[in-house]
Amino acid sequence: MAVENKIPSEEIVNDKFDQATANLLVKTGLGLSIGIVASALLFKRRMWPVTFFTGAGVGASYADAQRIFDSVSALGRPAASNNSA
Amino acid sequence: MLRASALTTKTLAVAAATRTASMRYVSRMPAKGYATTTAGSKPPASVGSSVPPAVKEGIRDPNTSFTASPKPAAKKKKSHKIRNTTLLALVAGTGFVAAAAYAQEDQDFGRNFEQYVPGAKSFMDLIRYHDDSVAMAASDVAFQAYDDIVYTGRFIYTQLYNLLNMLQHNTWQGSDSSGDTTKLATKKPKPVPVAATPTGGQTANEANPIAIVPMGNIQVAVEIPPMHSENKAVAALSKALSTVVSALNKKGLSSENVQELAALSDALVALDKSLGHIKDEERQAIEAALAVERSVFEASLAEFQELAHAALVTREAQLLEDRDKQLGAAAAAMDERVAKELSSQRDLLERRFNRYVRARVDEERGGRLAHLDRVEAQLRQLNQMAQESGDLIRRSRAVSTLGVAISALKSAAMGSRVQTPFASELSALASAATTDFPATRAAIAAIPLAMAEHGVPSQVELEDRFDTVRKEIRSVSLVPENGNLGSQVLSATLSKVMFEKEGLVEGEDVEAVLSRTGFYLRQHNLDRAARELNQLSGWPKKLAEDWISAARRRLEVEQAISVAESEEMLAKLSII
């Protein structure tokens, strides 16, 4: 937590992008490896477990990126919201 | 070689036998039977042939034979259009109803659903109408659809029936159709363009006079013009009567009806006359009442006039009394003042007399007493002067100490090009700011110690940092208040093709604010630059926060120093 305070405010978006990219790489790699292992051991060396788990990794990293870039946690809930619906 | 040829002959015979047995039989391997070869591949065992597995490459398959029957056309793939469409419609309908049910739980989803999906808003309104029951709404829609389909079917059926009738019998009105049309007319409450057939039937009847008995009914027509009268209701009634009569004319009247109508019009005339009488009577009654009221009013008016006159007289007497009283008081005050002035004049004269006497006494005594007095007075004066000059010296020393401390602080905090701490200079200024300089004391107390120990960023540092801040803010300028990953990425890419504004431009958008801030910074006007940048909101504001707080810290220290300087100048001016 102490390290987080040192980031100057103009860098927070770049920092978030870095986090999101690192997350993407890690989770995709994890998914890919799990897919390869699963395909090799359980699914008779077919292609689809690899793509499935890689996709799952990408999806998990996308969900994390949504959470990282969430406006409400960065800016706070907007004071006045228009009820137009 | 012989064995091979024997084998081939045998297989040829077998193949011919099977071929003659069923000419149209298509084997499971169609390629085999129709002048094609499966060169190189081992033919698997097929039904009804005993082919040896090994076939030499390049040699034609022994099972090939030439037949006259044509190649069977490729099986047309059955396209299940209706089935697929029904399935798709069912899935879409289920999805729609499920989305509507979910929209009840999740309000955001509901808003998006209503906005973007056609027909969703009316369905959601229907659900709300049915007390939030999706099942009721769906069944309502289903019943309406069923009604519509049934009605459309019936309508088409009757139209076709009538058309058929026309073609067969040359008449629009069939024996069943009238019954159907009346049923239709009573059943359908919705405004639907009803076909011309029902009314057309009746007009056709009337327009065909040959079919009617000739002297059946004599058409009688009567005319009653509308009456002019003073009373609006009666006039309206007579107008209505005339329109009714004209409508009845079209239908046909008999003699009794004419009599009744004449009686009606007579009654209307009598009514009008009686109303006139009533009005006259009422008018007379009102005039009598008005005369009575007028006399009453005049009596009360005369009474009121007398009262007012009496009140005026008493008021006049009172005012005269007040005036006399005030005149007396003013005269008394005058006398008092004269007496006071006289007494002060007397005092003055007494003093002068005393002084004169003393002077004469001193003169006579040789003036030594006077001398002593004079000396004493001079000594007192000198004392005072010494005190004043001591005071002055103390004050000027305090002011110059303050000035030195201020300039030291200024050069420490503001002077350098990098951020330097100025805690010691600040404490020196705090000690130099005695109780003579309250504003400086207050300004210094407002600067926290942590800020003094870290120092404040210099102007150059801030201006440099602003370049980075500006770049970052530009890349996040298009993100909305509730934006997420997608909008961040879009903003980062689209902002690269946006024009960067420069100079003092008008406008409230991010680019204009940034360019105005840059302009002020180039003029080294940090205060206005910070104010401009503070106008941002949302993500750009979040990114600019640190820069603004750094600029604010510097501005605070600047302000404190300027307060101290102005107080010092004020003190100097008071010393002069």
Image (cartoon, coloured by chain):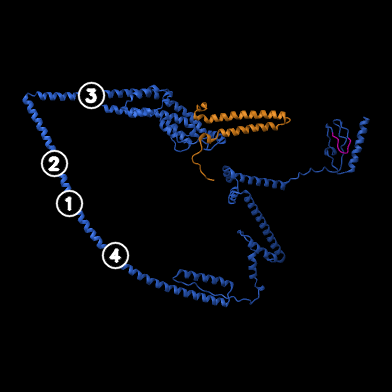
Chain colours: A orange, B blue
Q: Which residue is mark 1?
A: B324
Please state which amino acid type lies under the numbered disc 4. Ser
Residue at the location (34% across, 68% down)?
B290
Question: Sequence order check: which comes first, mark 4 or mark 1?
Answer: 4
Question: Chain ID for label 3?
Answer: B
Of B8 and B127, the residue lying toward us: B127
Q: Which mark is residue B339?
A: 2
Q: Is residue B564 left or right of residue B372?
A: right
Q: What type of secondary structure mainly makes up the magenta span? A: loop
Q: Is residue B203 left or right of residue B419?
A: right
Tag 2, which chain?
Answer: B
Answer whether residue B33 is visible to the viewer in this image.
Answer: yes
Q: Report the Cα–Cα distance between label 2 and label 1.
A: 23 Å
Q: In terms of secondary structure, where does tag 3 sit?
A: helix
Q: Which mark is residue B300?
A: 4
SS for callout 4: helix
Q: Who's the residue at 87% across and 41% down the image?
A: B67
Callout 4: residue from which chain?
A: B
Q: Are marks 4 and 3 in contact (CB under 8 Å)?
A: no
Q: CA distance from mark 4 to mark 3?
A: 87 Å
Residues behind callouts 2 and 1 on a single chain: yes
- CB atoms of marks 4 and 1 within 8 Å: no
**Sequence-first tag of 3 and 2:** 2
**Which tag is nearer the camera, tag 3 or tag 1?**
1
Question: Dot 1: what SS?
Answer: helix
User: In the image, are marks 2 and 4 on the same chain?
Assistant: yes
B115 left or right, relative to B231: right
